[in-house]
Image (spheres, rainbow, N blue to C red):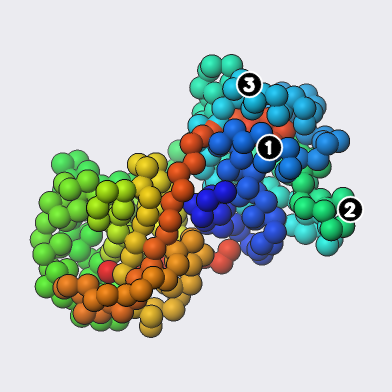
């Protein structure tokens, strides 16, 4: 399991956290994507009771055989919402909504699915294993044009968002520090300084209103720097920063990146906590030319998972969006 698997689950968590179950859900996600039969064998109880989307009971043996043969291959697994309820010290129920892309018998199936998994430590001290569960497709609801969404900026399509990028970035910088010459250079031409060299700028939109932004800036082969991450004050507390950060990490991982770095300031304690939640760790700091406000460096190592809806293993938190960095 990689840091990105754990971060994806933690970003989807709603309500009280149960670290053991969140970690178990992250492990089964990684095993599904990698078709890691040995890991799935450890995570699934031998006497499994699991109902598939067709209403039929599946067995552990059939699930492992499908992964082993390649009859089922998970190609994408994007957690959207994870809720956990502890029933006792050795039993917990997890409800996971996830967007999946899965090859079943050579046919690619895409959709949103809901898993209910019962995790148990049957002998008390045993590791958590899935003892029962169910997976079903989530009916597609009519599109709500006002629903929050993340947009990767394409300057030719939305030239108006250049000003939004500057406005959102200035808001958080000026709330804590001063805008510096290097910021001004980026604001003048974000398409040329970030997008053209192979990076990306993302916006969190409600309807057509940009409420948050962040950027992934190329920093060398397989490395991106996270920058300009912030949410407007009126929209904080809705988990938007969490969503932007998770999306940016997923974008970099999908491009085979090895690492994501960032520069920040130790006075921004809420931001630091959120970075650590997504797997970032502190590294030795060296002064960054053009950014006097930074005094800390963090990095996330991305171990690419190649991968992969519905079978027994399955097939078809604390949210603080007030983020700030260089």
Question: Where 180 sits versus 57, above or below?
Answer: below
Taking depth in this image into account, of 150 and 160 the one nearest to the observer is 150
Q: In the image, which disc is placed on residue 123?
A: 2
Question: Does residue 140 show up?
Answer: no
Q: In which quadrant of the rendered view does residue 73 lie?
A: top right
Q: Residue at x 59, y 22 (%)?
A: 70
Residue placed at 65% from the left, 55% from the top? 22
Residue matched to label 3: 69
Mark 2 lies on a secondary structure that is: loop
Q: In the image, what residue occupies the spot 66% across and 62% down? A: 19
Position of 158 compared to 176: left or right?
left
Which residue has dot 1 on it?
A: 38
Q: Residue at x 46, y 48 (%)?
A: 303
- Whichever of labels 2 and 3 marks the residue nearer the N terminus, that label is 3
In the image: residue 25, left or right of residue 268: right
Disc 2 from disc 3: Cα separation: 31 Å
Q: Position of residue 291 (x, y in %)?
A: 20, 74
């Amino acid at each position: 399991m990689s840091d990105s698997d754990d971060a994806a689950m933690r970003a989807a968590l709603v309500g009280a956290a149960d670290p053991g179950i969140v970690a178990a859900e992250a492990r089964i996600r990684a095993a599904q994507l990698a078709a890691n039969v040995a890991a799935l064998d450890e995570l699934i109880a031998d006497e499994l009771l699991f109902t598939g989307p067709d209403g039929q009971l599946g067995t552990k043996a059939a699930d492992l055989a499908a992964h082993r043969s390649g009859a089922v291959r998970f190609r994408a697994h994007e957690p959207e919402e994870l809720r956990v309820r502890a029933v006792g010290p050795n039993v917990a129920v997890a409800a996971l909504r996830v967007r999946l892309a899965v090859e079943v018998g050579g046919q690619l199936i895409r959709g949103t699915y809901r898993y209910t998994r019962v995790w148990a430590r049957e002998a008390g001290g045993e590791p958590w294993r899935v003892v029962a569960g169910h997976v079903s497709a989530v009916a597609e609801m009519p599109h709500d044009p006002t629903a929050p969404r993340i947009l990767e900026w394409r300057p030719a399509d939305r030239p108006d968002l250049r000003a939004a990028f500057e406005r959102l970035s200035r808001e958080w910088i000026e709330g804590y520090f001063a805008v510096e010459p290097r910021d001004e250079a980026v604001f003048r031409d974000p398409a040329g300084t970030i997008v053209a060299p192979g990076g990306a700028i993302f916006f969190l939109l409600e309807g057509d209103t940009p409420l948050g932004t962040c950027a992934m800036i190329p920093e060398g082969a397989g490395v991106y720097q996270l920058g300009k991450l912030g949410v407007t004050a009126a929209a904080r507390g809705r988990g938007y920063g969490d969503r932007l950060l998770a999306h940016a990490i997923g974008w970099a991982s999908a491009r085979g990146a090895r690492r994501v770095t960032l520069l920040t300031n130790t006075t921004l304690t809420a931001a630091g906590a959120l970075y650590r939640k997504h797997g970032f760790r502190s590294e030795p700091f060296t002064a960054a030319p053009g950014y006097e406000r930074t005094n800390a460096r963090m990095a996330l190592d991305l171990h690419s998972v190649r991968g992969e809806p519905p079978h027994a293993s399955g097939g078809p938190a604390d949210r603080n969006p007030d983020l700030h960095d260089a």
